[in-house]
Amino acid sequence: MHIAIPLYPGFTALDAVGPYTVMALTPGCEVSFVASELGPVIDDQGKPTLVATTTYAALPGPDIVIVPGGPGTTEALGDRALLDWLTAADAHTRWTTSVCSGSFILAAAGFLTGRKATSHWGWRDQLAAFGAEPVADRVVFDGKYVTAAGVSSGIDMALTLVARETDDRTAQTVQLAIEYDPEPPFDTGSPEKAPADLHAEAIALINT
C-alpha cells in the first residue's frame, strides 16, 4: 500500500511526520513525501525540514493521501499543481485524508461538500464556508474522506487507518512501538479545557 503525503511551503512538520511515522512502521506500507518538484520544502518555521523524494507526476495513483495543514494552507488553496494532483489521485485512493487545516485543501478540491469534517479548533467553523459540515471531533470519517483536528491528532488518525486497513492488533503494535501513551503535563489541549485567555496566544503561535 502506497501512502503519499504532499508537501507545500508553510506546512506544519508534525502534521506530516506524525502520520508518516505511524504508516511507515506498518507492514506492507510505503510512504512518500511528494511535491511538484523534488527537494527540500520549507515548513512553517522557515526551515527546510522535509524533502520531497517523489513528484506528483511520478505518483499519480496512491492508495492513501494525507494532506498536512499549516500556515501555508492559505496559499496552497490556490496551488493548481497540488489541487489537480489531488483530484486525479482521489480517483484511485482508498482513503483521502488531512490533518489540521489540510482539510481546507481537501475542501478546495471539492471533496468535502456536504460532508462532515474537522480541522484545528481555531479554524474549524470556517469549513462551513467551503461547503463542509464542521464537527468538533478529533478524527472524522465520512465515506473515504477522513479529517483530523489539530496537529497531534494526525497520529490518532493514522493509527485508526492502520486498524481499518489491517487489524486492531497491528495498530496496537505500532502504537506501542512509538510509545504513544500521552500524559501531558497540563490539561489544556483543547479550547474547552484551556483558560480563555490562552486561546488568542495559542492561535498566534501557529499562525505566524
Image (cartoon, rainbow, N blue to C red):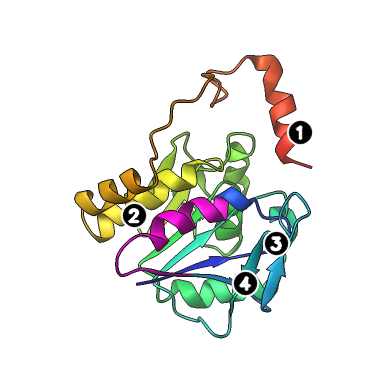
Task: Point out the tag, 4 or 3, that comes first from the N-terminus.
Answer: 4
Q: Which residue is mark 4?
A: 52
Task: Point out the tag, 4 or 1, that comes first from the N-terminus.
Answer: 4
Task: Point out the tag, 2 or 3, that comes first from the N-terminus.
Answer: 3
Q: Quadrant of residue 83?
A: bottom right
Circle 4 or circle 3, nearest the eye: 4
Q: Is residue 48 above or below residue 93?
A: above
Q: Amino acid at mark 2?
A: Leu
Q: Quadrant of residue 208?
A: top right
Q: Which residue is mark 3?
A: 76
Task: Point out the tag, 2 or 1, that comes first from the N-terminus.
Answer: 2
Q: Amino acid at mark 4?
A: Ala
Q: Are marks 4 and 1 in contact (CB under 8 Å)?
A: no
| Percent position of residue 160, x then y | 33, 49
Q: Local crowd at mark 2 within 10 Å, few (<14), some, or many (≥20)?
A: many
Q: Which residue is mark 1?
A: 204
C-alpha span from label 2 to label 3: 25 Å
Circle 4 or circle 1, nearest the eye: 4
Secondary-structure class at tag 1: helix
Secondary-structure class at tag 3: helix
Q: Are marks 2 and 1 in contact (CB under 8 Å)?
A: no
| Percent position of residue 17, x then y | 54, 54
Q: Amino acid at mark 3?
A: Ala
Q: Which residue is mark 2?
A: 161
Circle 2 or circle 4, nearest the eye: 4
Circle 2 or circle 3, nearest the eye: 2
Is 97 covered by the magenta stretch?
no
What's the magenta region? 15-31
